Image (spheres, helix red, strand yellow):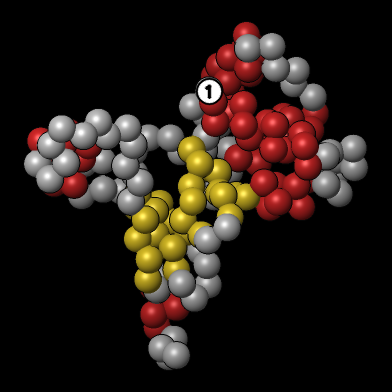
């Protein structure tokens, strides 16, 4: 995260009465590494360096970031919620073998910003579409090179 962007986020969190402890700043910094993390991933990665970190702090911080639109919540894996700091519209691919989740830039003819309007004008006419999540499942390039089970 660029310094200016980080300062903007910190100021925004403070405006909403969010106290920025070292643990909460570490969560924000980890999310900035542009990955797809569960709350347990974050807790596990930071607990040794921040022994006072609690799971509640991780979950509460993620909830505030989600409410402010600073992270997106992904439900691509069964029973696991992942958090993505990239909030611009895009798709996700899940490798069924290694479990890796990667960002997929949409094709121009499948612009995620236009998809709700296109659906509402066509097959979902009369419906109010609030959000579209597109998850792609298959084998990543590395796993597809290995023998298929």
Mark yes or no: residue 79 visible.
yes
Report the quarter where the C terminus lies: bottom left
The residue located at (18%, 47%) in the rendering is 110
Mark yes or no: residue 3 visible.
no
The residue located at (52%, 34%) in the rendering is 71
**Quadrant housing residue 137:** bottom left
Closer to the camera in the image, 39 or 3: 39
Q: Residue furthest right?
A: 51
Left or right, 29 with reference to 96 = right
Closer to the camera in the image, 8 or 83: 83
Left or right, 73 with reference to 138 = right
Q: Position of residue 124 (x, y in %)?
A: 16, 41
**Quadrant housing residue 141:** bottom left
Left or right, 80 with reference to 90 = right
Q: Position of residue 57 (x, y in %)?
A: 76, 34
Residue 139, compared with residue 49, is above or below; it is below
Q: Which residue does the numbered mark 1 point to in the structure image?
A: 68
Residue 33, compared with residue 102, is above or below; it is above
Label 1 element class:
loop
The residue located at (50%, 41%) in the rendering is 73
Residue 20, compared with residue 98, is above or below; it is above
Report the quarter where the N terminus lies: top right
The residue located at (48%, 47%) in the rendering is 74
């Amino acid at each position: 995260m660029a310094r200016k962007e980080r300062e903007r986020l910190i100021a925004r969190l403070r405006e909403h009465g969010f106290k920025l402890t070292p643990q909460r700043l570490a969560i924000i910094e980890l999310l900035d590494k542009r990955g797809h993390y569960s709350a347990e991933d974050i807790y596990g990665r930071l607990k040794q360096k921040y022994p006072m970190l609690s799971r509640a702090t991780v979950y509460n911080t993620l909830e505030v970031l989600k409410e402010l639109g600073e992270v997106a919540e992904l439900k691509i894996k069964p029973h696991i919620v992942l958090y993505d700091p990239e909030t611009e519209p895009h798709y996700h691919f899940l490798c069924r073998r290694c479990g890796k989740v990667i960002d997929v830039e949409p094709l121009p003819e499948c612009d995620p910003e236009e998809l709700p309007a296109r659906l509402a004008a066509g097959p979902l006419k009369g419906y109010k579409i609030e959000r579209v999540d597109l998850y792609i499942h298959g084998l990543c390039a590395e796993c597809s090179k290995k023998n298929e089970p």
